[in-house]
Amino acid sequence: MLKAVIFDMDGVLINSEPYYLQQRLDYFKLLGIDVSDEHVQNMTGGNMKIALPQLLPGKTTAQYARIRRGYRYFKSQHPQDFNAMLMPDTRRVLQHLKEQNIRMALASSSDRQTINTMLATTGLKEYFETTLSGEDFERSKPDPSIYLTALEKLAIDAKDAAAVEDSEMGIAAAKAAGIFTFAVAVADPRVATDQSQADYRLRKLGQLPGAVTLMRGHLQ
């Protein structure tokens, strides 16, 4: 029986992927780094830990860390309006799941500071029993570590959980953890991604409650 839903953040709860993409491109431009279309696609759903070795192969761990610190400072000078980024149905969906006694966790590739700021400014923190950041793990999505840890913290089996993702890397991570995976359609073609491996595809987040109801009925 479905007991919990584990959400990705970017592109699922908030429409942030196009903003993050432009922010990263602006930062790389300051560093004099050219970003190919292929690298743009690879950045969707990932974080700087994944993007930098692809863009700048051969750097040392210390050099990558220094560039990431610079990016964190760059972001602090260009703060996000997370309330404006919220998907139209985010609050309604989370409230519905809460009323149905479905537990919730957040498993995002974003850094901890960004996650905490988003939850605090939008007031969504109350819905999640646990929140996990990609920077807390040696290997980021598509590695399943973040989802396996979410299951461990919730103390449930994979068969009793569902994941909500938007990116190819995120879907791969959830599937590798053995979790039934919903994919929310991506509207912006610049951050389009392959969602074919998802178990169920949603045109928008607002369809999730109905899909979850059908899923619970099927599993009972």
Image (cartoon, helix red, strand yellow):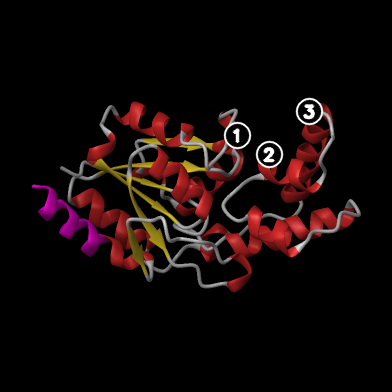
Q: Quadrant of residue 111?
A: top right
Hey, what amino acid is under mark 1? Glu
214 falls in the magenta region: yes
In terms of depth relative to the viewer, which is nearer, 79 or 48? 48
Q: Which of marks 3 and 2 is nearer the N terminus?
A: 2
Hey, what amino acid is under mark 2? Lys
The percent coordinates of residue 77 (x first, y second) are: 76, 51
Residue farthest to the right? 32
Q: Earlier in the sequence, mark 3 or mark 1?
A: 3
In the depicted structure, whether residue 48 falls above or below residue 152: below
The percent coordinates of residue 204 (x first, y second) are: 38, 69
- Mark 2 in CB contact with mark 1 (< 8 angstroms): yes
**In front: label 2 or label 1:** 2
Q: Quadrant of residue 140?
A: top right
Hey, what amino acid is under mark 3? Thr
In the depicted structure, whether residue 215 falls above or below residue 190: above
Q: Which of marks 2 and 1 is nearer the N terminus?
A: 2
Secondary structure of the residue carrying numbered label 3:
helix
Disc number for residue 61: 3
- Is 113 on the left or on the right of 148, as rendered? right
Q: How far apart are marks 3 and 1 (CA)?
A: 14 Å
- Is 203 on the left or on the right of 168, as rendered? left
- Mark 3 in CB contact with mark 1 (< 8 angstroms): no
Extent of the magenta region: 209-220
**In front: label 3 or label 1:** 3
Q: Distance between the residues labelled 3 and 2?
A: 10 Å
The percent coordinates of residue 55 (x first, y second) are: 79, 48
Residue farthest to the left? 220
Circle 2 sits on which residue? 49
At x 84% / y 35%, what residue is drawn?
A: 58
